[in-house]
Image (cartoon, grey):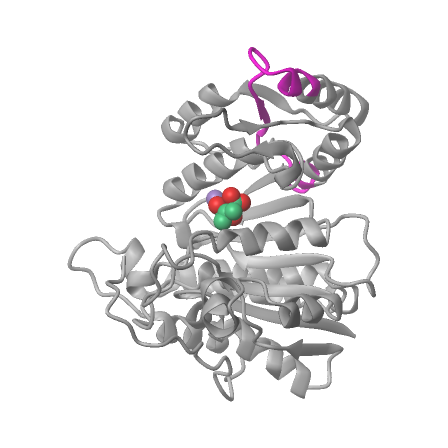
């Protein structure tokens, strides 16, 4: 049995999860080994409901679950960022609490193959608060970057697996070896991993990598890099794909056995898009990609072929349906979120029985959506 805790979070987080959650509830009804819990308060919405962006009930739900499916964390209409300044800290806290230390992102590039970005998401530039010194504006601020070779190796090993699954595609390892000691360690390990596995990893400095990702027609199949570089480069790849909505994100603990709290968090990689909240126009591709990754990750589900089914239904919609607004040229016909989901269910060969994520309650306020 895989227990999936829902953390819809902020802004469009709830609506983009509608399709995937409806799908999971259907699996539950069909007697598959799935239990869906929540939705639990999280992010700015959690702060409104409970006074905390990551309240104890949500932490407890994560301790009792195997994986999280999340929508978005960020600003929410009706809540000012002075009141709730850093909702993203909830996501960072979850990563640290459950040692979800590797991020594997899949960008669905229309008309091309996927690009997968693998990076460390705790440690390095994403270290916890003990590696930082805040400044009041007069003293120095400090962010210490420390890379543990064993942790880098783990990230590189996952990238090698990904590269093996994409024969013929370029796999690049990105660093700034001309400046950083951590990058020189990264490159040393990248070279030795390439030599020992026979899988070619091309080593690029991050500035060159950014240039090539924008300029070269052909995108690499795999990018492996340090957390902060990967954060930036994954957004560049999304820009190449045409929309931030085309990225599914898995944040995993590669070593963790099931039964000790969440082993992974799956989410679309886009933000909470507060000004579009409730418009039901957003493109839910990232949430469907996250669902597909979740179905491949959970041991009880991975053998059932559901991951491939969802991916192929999604690909069919992306290639045959009119685009959502974010991908449409001016004046072109578009479909909205619900039409998109209907088409995915049609392609899957079954109809959803209900849309099941209740809207998150946020009190009305005069605060302008940003
Ligand atoms: C992302 C986001 C997060 C990150 C933020 C919200 C902490 O930008 O998932 O790419 O930097 O990892
Ligand atoms: Mn980011």
Within the magenta stretch, is there residue 151? no
Residue 200 sits in quarter: top right
Q: Which residues are magenta?
A: 162-185
- Residue at 71% x, 18% y is 191
Position of the N terminus, as image quadrant, is bottom right
- Is 145 in front, or is 234? 145
- Residue at 67% x, 83% y is 28
Position of the C terminus, as image quadrant, is bottom left
- Is 273 in front, or is 78? 78
Does residue 113 show up? no
Please state the horizontal and vertical placement of residue 246, each as a whole percent of the image: 44, 53
- Residue at 27% x, 62% y is 369
Relative side of 16 to 309, left or right:
left
Relative side of 83 to 35, left or right:
left
Relative side of 191 to 7, left or right:
right
Q: Is residue 179 above or below residue 138?
A: above
- Is 125 in front, or is 186? 125
Does residue 281 show up? yes
Please state the horizontal and vertical placement of residue 242, each as a whole percent of the image: 35, 47
Within the magenta stretch, is there residue 174? yes
Residue 323 sits in quarter: bottom left
Name of the residue lying farthest toward the left = 331
Name of the residue lying farthest toward the top = 178
Please state the horizontal and vertical placement of residue 87, each as a whole percent of the image: 48, 56
Please state the horizontal and vertical placement of residue 239, each as a whole percent of the image: 37, 42
- Residue at 60% x, 59% y is 266
């Amino acid at each position: 049995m895989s227990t999936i805790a829902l953390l819809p979070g902020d802004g469009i987080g709830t609506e983009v999860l509608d399709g995937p959650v409806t799908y999971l509830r259907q699996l539950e009804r069909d007697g598959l080994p799935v239990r869906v819990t929540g939705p639990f308060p999280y992010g700015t919405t959690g702060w409104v409901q409970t006074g905390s962006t990551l309240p104890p009930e949500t932490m407890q739900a994560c301790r009792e679950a195997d994986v999280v499916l999340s929508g978005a964390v960020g600003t929410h209409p009706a809540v000012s960022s002075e009141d709730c300044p850093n909702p993203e800290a909830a996501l960072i806290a979850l990563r640290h609490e459950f040692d979800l230390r590797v991020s594997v992102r899949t960008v669905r590039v229309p008309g091309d193959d996927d690009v997968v970005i693998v990076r460390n998401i705790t440690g390095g530039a994403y270290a916890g608060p003990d590696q930082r010194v805040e400044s009041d504006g007069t003293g120095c601020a400090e962010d210490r970057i420390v890379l543990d070779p064993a942790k880098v190796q783990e990230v590189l090993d996952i990238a090698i697996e990904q590269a093996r699954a994409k024969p013929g595609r370029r796999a690049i390892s990105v660093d700034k070896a001309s400046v950083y000691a951590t990058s020189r360690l990264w490159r040393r390990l990248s070279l030795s991993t390439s030599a020992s596995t026979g899988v070619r990893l091309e080593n690029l400095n991050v500035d060159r990598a950014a240039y090539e990702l924008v300029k070269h027609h052909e995108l690499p199949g795999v990018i492996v890099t340090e957390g902060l570089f990967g954060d930036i480069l994954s957004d560049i790849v999304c820009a190449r794909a045409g929309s931030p909505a085309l990225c599914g994100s898995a944040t995993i603990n590669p070593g963790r056995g099931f039964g000790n709290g969440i082993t992974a968090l799956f989410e679309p990689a886009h933000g909470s898009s507060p000004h579009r909240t409730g418009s039901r126009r957003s493109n839910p591709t990232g949430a469907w990609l996250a669902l597909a990754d979740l179905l491949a990750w959970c041991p009880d589900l991975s053998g059932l072929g559901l991951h491939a089914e969802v991916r192929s239904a999604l690909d069919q919609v992306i290639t045959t349906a009119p685009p959502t607004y974010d991908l449409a040229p001016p004046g072109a016909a578009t479909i909205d979120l619900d039409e998109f989901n209907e088409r995915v269910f049609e392609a899957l060969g079954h109809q959803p029985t209900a849309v099941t994520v209740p809207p998150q309650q946020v009190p009305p306020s005069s605060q302008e959506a940003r």
